[in-house]
Amino acid sequence: MRDTVVLYPGLGVSHLLPMVELSGLFLRRGLAVTVVVVEPPAASTDASSRVARAAEANPSIHFHVLPLPPPDTTVSPELPRDPFALFRLANAPLRDYLRSVSPSAASMRALVFDFFCIDALDVAAELGVPAYLFYTSGACSLAVSLHLPHKQAEVSASFGDIGDAPLCFPGVPPFIPTDLPENALDRDNKVYRKILYTFERVPACHGILVNTFEWLEAKAVAAIREGACVPGRATPPVYCVGPLVSGGGEAKKHECLSWLDAQPEKSVVFFCFGSMGSFSKRQLEAIATGLEMSGQRFLWVVRSPRRDGASLYADDGHQPPEPDLRELLPEGFLERTKAWGLVAKATGAFVTHCGWNSVREGITAGVPLLCWPLYAEQRLNKVFMVEEARVGVEMAGYDREVVAADSEDGRRLRGRAMAANERPWRLCSKG
C-alpha cells in the first residue's frame, strides 16, 4: 500500500480545482492522493457533477464524498450553511473515514486542508497525522490574514470606522481599510470573528502551502517566513507550490476558442468575473455600451444578475440560471458587435474580478490585468497586482475604459505581464 496524502478542499469549484491541481505534485512523487469532499447542505446535481467531472478527468486520484451527520434538531432542523460550522460538523465523519482507510497513521503522510476546514486540525492531532494548510489565494492576502488578529488587537475600533489612513501590514504595500474584505470592516461581524479564529489557529499547522510562486510575491513570503505576521509565535514552514495552472486538455474544443484563434494576436480583451460574481442589468448595459463605443475585440462571459441585486452568488453547488442576452444587453448589441465580439494568443488583456485563480491564470498567460474586484480578498489581490507586481491597472477611477494595445501605457503593462509570465515557468523547468 502506497503512502497517502489526503486533500480536504472547501466548498465550491474555486476551492476544489486548486486542490486537484495540487494533487499532481504528490502524484509525481509516487504518493497516492485522496480528495475528501463535503457536499453543500443544499446538495444539488450541479455539485455532484463537479466532483464527477473532476474524478473523470483525474482517474489517478481517489475521490470520496463525506456523508454529513443529521442536523441537531434542538438547534435547527437544517444543516448549517455557514461553511466554518459545516466543516466543524464534518469532523466526526472525517475522523471515521481516515481511520477506515488508514488504520496505521504511518501510511498517511499528511492531511492538507483548506482554511475553511481549520478545525480538521483537531482530527489530525487525534490521529497523529501531520496537518498542512493549503491557502488557495496568494501570499499577500495570506500575510494580511495572518496578521489581522494582531492588528485588530491594536485597533480599538472597527477598520470601517477609522477613515482612509493607509494600513501597514508586513510584506505588502500600504492599503486603505476598504481594501479589506467587507466582513473585516466590522470588528463584531460574525464571519470576521470566525476568520480571526481561523488564522489564530494556523501557526499550529505543520506547514503552509501557498498557491503562488516565490518570485512573484517575494516580500510577502519573506515576511511570513520571518515571523513578522504572527509576532511572538512560531511560524510553520511556508512552501510556494505554484504556478498551479492546468493546461486546456479537453478533447472537445469550445466554439469560443475557434473564434479566438481567428483573431489577431493580443487583440482581444477577456471579461470574466469568476464562478460567483454577478452584475445588475444596469451594470451589464453600461459595460456593453463601453465595449461597443471602444471598438475593441472582446470575449465576455455574462452571468445572470441576482434577483436581489447582490454582486455575489452563493457557491452552494447550484448553477445560476442561463442569461437571456437579448433581454439583458442593449437592443441590437449582439448584432452590431458580432463581427468583433463574442458573448490563446488572441487575448490581449483580461478584465478580472481579481479572484486568485483568475489572477494566476492571467499572469502565467502573460496578459495585462484590468482589475475590477468584487468580494472576499479580491481588493487585496488588486492592491498587490497594481502596486507591487505592476501587472494590472485598477478600473475604478481609471481615465480610460481599456488600455489600448498600441498605447505607451499598454506596451509597458504588457511588457511587465510578459516578464511575469516567463519567470515562473523557467523556475518550474528547473524542478
Image (cartoon, grey):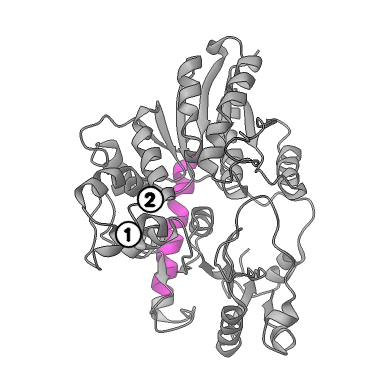
56 over 188 or under it: above or below = above
- Asked whether residue 97 is in view, the answer is yes
Q: Quadrant of residue 21?
A: top right
Q: In terms of secondary structure, where does tag 2 sit?
A: helix
| Mark 1 closeness class: few <14, some 14–19, many ≥20 residues within 10 Å | some
Magenta stretch in the rendered image: 411-431
Q: Residues within 10 Å of mark 2 (few under 14, many from 20)?
A: many
Coordinates of residue 164 in the picture (x, y in percent):
25, 68
- The circle on residue 406 is none
Using the rendered view, name the quadrant where residue 60 is placed. top right
Q: Which residue is mark 1?
A: 388
Q: Which residue is mark 2?
A: 141
User: What kind of residue is marked 1?
Assistant: Glu
Location of residue 399 with respect to 429 vertically, above or below: below
Residue visible at 42% across and 74% down? 411
C-alpha gap between disc 1 and disc 2 = 13 Å
Q: Quadrant of residue 287?
A: bottom right
Q: Residue at 53% of width from left, 11% of height from top?
A: 106
